[in-house]
Image (cartoon, helix red, strand yellow):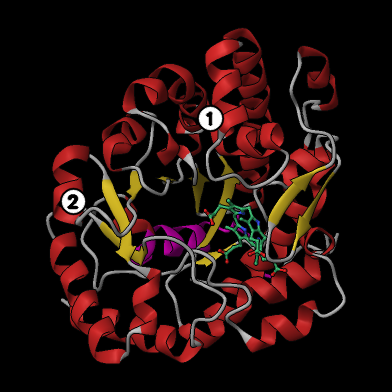
Amino acid sequence: MGAPCVSWHDGAVTSVLNDSPFVRACRGQEVPHTPVWFMRQAGRSLPEYRKIREGVGMLESCRRPELVTEITLQPVRRHQVDAAILFSDIVVPIAAAGIDLDIVAGTGPVVAEPIRAESDLERLRPITADDVDFVAESVRLLVAELGSTPLIGFAGAPFTLASYLIEGGPSRTYLKTKAMMYAAPGLWDALLSRLADITLSFLRTQIDAGVSAVQLFDSWAGALSEADYREHVLPHSARVLRGLADAGVPRIHFGVGTAVLLDAMGEAGADVVGVDWRTPLDQATKVIGPDRSVQGNLDPALLFAGWDVVRREADRVLEQGRAAPGHVFNLGHGVMPETDPDILTRLVAHVHEASAR
Ligand code: CP3
């Protein structure tokens, strides 16, 4: 059968993971120290990542379970972070759903034929666990390797995925995305419903294979007003997050530039709301309310300002995070590729030490 020596079905392992500082902080329970991980902790900031990725395309590397396992483990070994995040990308499930796309280095996802009309929707079919079997296999391998360190699964939220599908690639203005949202609400809802179904299946696959938490990335939701977010986006994200309520794993919901959306993103069905560097965590928690933890939010650019600044600002983030029922330390967005990885290692040690109780 090739069953891994440590299986997530093993009650003892599950209870160790449920008792990890990361999962406890997500649930607003007491922790021995504030847990810390970094969005994009695996990736180009690590020389060992650049080496192992040589000559292998991004999408291709996401489809090779042994490679995914090694890349996911690299930052855990190096930095001693409190959680691993599956190495994958938000466009992996939409590629599995039949969309012709590529991830171009230095640019991001590029879609060959963008979705602009009702007839384009046929190219986005539902996915089954079989379409992403390499993801389930990667999660199983990782859970066996990680032991007491929890693994975070993730997916892109319907709005952020739709923005890539409609624009055809990254965008600053989201002109075509917003035009569809305002001018063709029927098509918009049909597209986001399909994306919600795909996202739900993708996250279910990861949960069934053993991840300890999931993060829904609505990275670009900050382009919207609260009213538009509530009307056109929240119902679809809520279908994903609420659809996982029975799974028993913490749900983290994150976006950039979302100061006016934080309470709505919590209401969509998150246990933890990710906050970027623009909003202090004590202010964020006032808006989000006492029932949800927060994650964040050191400015990733600060990591270029020298250790004294990093330490001072990390202490401020820890202090402001104490206002929330639970705090998971993170950056306010992903690690930049030029970041000195030694600063990240030092930051993890500092967060652990400064928050020890
Ligand atoms: O360690 C981790 O955080 C897990 C890996 C991860 C990747 N993508 C790997 C990746 C995660 C969580 C993502 C999510 C993702 N992908 C998001 C949401 C998170 C966010 O940053 O807001 C978004 C918007 C994408 C789309 C995407 N994919 C972008 C914008 C890029 C960057 C393009 C570039 O080259 O700068 C990618 C490519 C990508 N995804 C890379 C990695 C490590 C870089 C490609 C490479 O290393 O060759």
Q: Is 328 on the left or on the right of 205, as rendered?
A: left
Which is nearer the eye, 81 or 332?
332
* Rendered image: mark on residue 325: 2
Instruction: Give amino acid for label 1.
Output: Val
Farthest top residue? 186
Element on which disc 1 rests: helix
Is disc 2 in contact with disc 1, using a CB cutoff of under 8 Å?
Answer: no
Residue 22 at what x, y percent from top left?
37, 63
Which is nearer the eye, 34 or 166?
166
Residue 71 at what x, y percent from top left?
68, 74
Residue 141 at what x, y percent from top left?
72, 66
The boundaries of the magenta stretch are 5-22
At horizontal 79% and vertical 71% (from top left) the residue drawn is 66
Disc 1 target residue = 240
Residue 289 visible in rendering: no
Position of 190 relative to 256 (above/below): above
At horizontal 45% and vertical 32% (from top left) the residue drawn is 245
Ligand 1's image quarter is: bottom right
